[in-house]
Image (cartoon, rainbow, N blue to C red):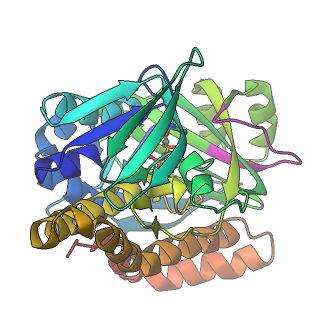
Amino acid sequence: MALSLARRGIAATVIEKRTGFGELGAGLQISPNSGRVLDALDLALPLKRVAVSSHGLRIRRWRDGRELLEMPTHAERLPTPFRMLKRNDLHTVLLDAARAMPNIRLMVGRAVQGVAQDEEGVSVRLEGQNGGGESIRALGLIGADGLWSRVRELTGDTSPPVFTGYEAWRALAPGARTDKPRVGLHLGSGRHAVHYPVAGGRESNLVVIRQTGEAREGWSHDGDPQVLTEHVANGSQALRELVDSARGWQVWSLFDRKPAAMAKGRIALLGDAAHPVLPFLAQGASLAIEDAAVLARLLAEHLEADGEQAVPAAMAAYASARSARVARVQEASRGNGRTYHLGWPLSMGRDFALRRLGPNGLQRRYDWLYDWHDG
Ligand SMILES: Cc1cc2nc3c(=O)[nH]c(=O)nc-3n(C[C@H](O)[C@H](O)[C@H](O)COP(=O)(O)OP(=O)(O)OC[C@H]3O[C@@H](n4cnc5c(N)ncnc54)[C@H](O)[C@@H]3O)c2cc1C
């Protein structure tokens, strides 16, 4: 967000409650819809150094590994690659670019606690890790503070995230060299697994979804590999071997939440704070990047036309520009979760439908998602 603003000449202060911007070693798929935004921020070159371009999505059955379908990635007809990379590599690229911008200020170890709006701007109350407080003034506040967003709460939305009954296990495995790197998806009853190369192909990011009785609080937790070995015991040999070779399992409980009103006066919400997306379409981070591009453009246009008093109008225009798309992506992700996890005999119908649809049919189904352009 800060980069999108700064490139349009709007100064930004980033407030991060953790003491550093480092991230856990898990991976991310960044599809062309948001990759295009990153390219426009001149990040294509640094991203090329750390990301692997996907050639497609290969879908298999969990139990025997039988291939159901391979969907070519839109890379063949789109100039923006479908990227697969480590989260901390993306963070590093963004952070380096932000540090190079004189109109971005980074404040770490401070959490947003409160906000008051008036005619001219907002006063944001921050709390340091040692408990000390301070206040900063700005034209507006953009809450990009994730699923458990404090800023969303401050807009009066106290509807809690709802536990889905699923948890995601993520780890890194040694990479397998291949000419055509792609995303692998294994569909099983009440479970699925996704894997793809990261770090120039030297490693594979592996995510396994399983049902569980209760939610774990917080961002992520260490996972016992034995639990996962048992979970994939009925899977194909290739899947079992992949899981056995993975190290450093981290577990995320998966929550869902209704989309928020994305703007209130001079406050806007973006990313998971506004509309958390279940990871069954790999779109949460992409939507946050899209949000940032749209909000920065609208702020720049309104500020230029009507000055600082136009911030609430820009925020409102952003909310109406984004609401239909984010709701559609949220719903499409939930839908994928339902079809991915179908049990026998419904799974037979799904597999038959997938094969009938064929690679191009499936690809066309996602045109609305990956062909997105701002403006
Ligand atoms: C298993 C799994 C796989 C996924 N795979 C993909 C994928 O392949 N592609 C994809 O696009 N998405 C994926 N996602 C979704 C993606 O991880 C999230 O949608 C994305 O991280 C949301 O970004 P965000 O910036 O909105 O929130 P977050 O990443 O949660 O960041 C919020 C930040 O705000 C900080 N913060 C919180 N409260 C405060 C406060 N009060 N004051 C200051 N700072 C605060 C936090 O410390 C954090 O740094 C996946 C998610 C999961 C669980």
Which residue: 35% across, 62% down? 119
Q: Is residue 146 left or right of residue 265?
A: right
Task: Name the residue nearer the viewer: 29 or 157.
Answer: 157
Residue occupying the point 79% across, 69% down: 343
Which residue is the extreme one toward the front? 119
Q: Position of residue 74 (x, y in %)?
A: 27, 67
Foreground: 219 or 86? Answer: 219
Q: Is residue 265 above or below residue 215?
A: below
- In the image, taking residue 225 as reference, residue 28 lies left or right, namely left
Viewer-nearest residue: 235 or 264: 264
- In this orientation, does residue 81 appear? no
Image-based side of 303 in relation to 94, left or right: left
Give residue 289's position: percent from left, percent from top.
33, 55
Indicate the quadrant where residue 278 lies.
Answer: bottom right
Q: Is residue 196 visible?
A: yes
Going 54% across and 78% down the picture, which residue do you hit? 354
> Which residue is nearer to you in this view: 68 or 28?
28
Q: Which residues are magenta?
A: 208-220
Residue 324 percent coordinates (x, y): 45, 81
Q: Give the dominant element type of the magenta stretch: helix, strand or loop.
A: loop
User: In this rendering, would 96 be left or right of 22?
Assistant: left
In the image, residue 215 lies in the stretch drawn in magenta? yes
- Magenta span includes 304: no
Residue at point 19% right, 76% down? 375
Image position of 147 with respect to 364: above or below: above
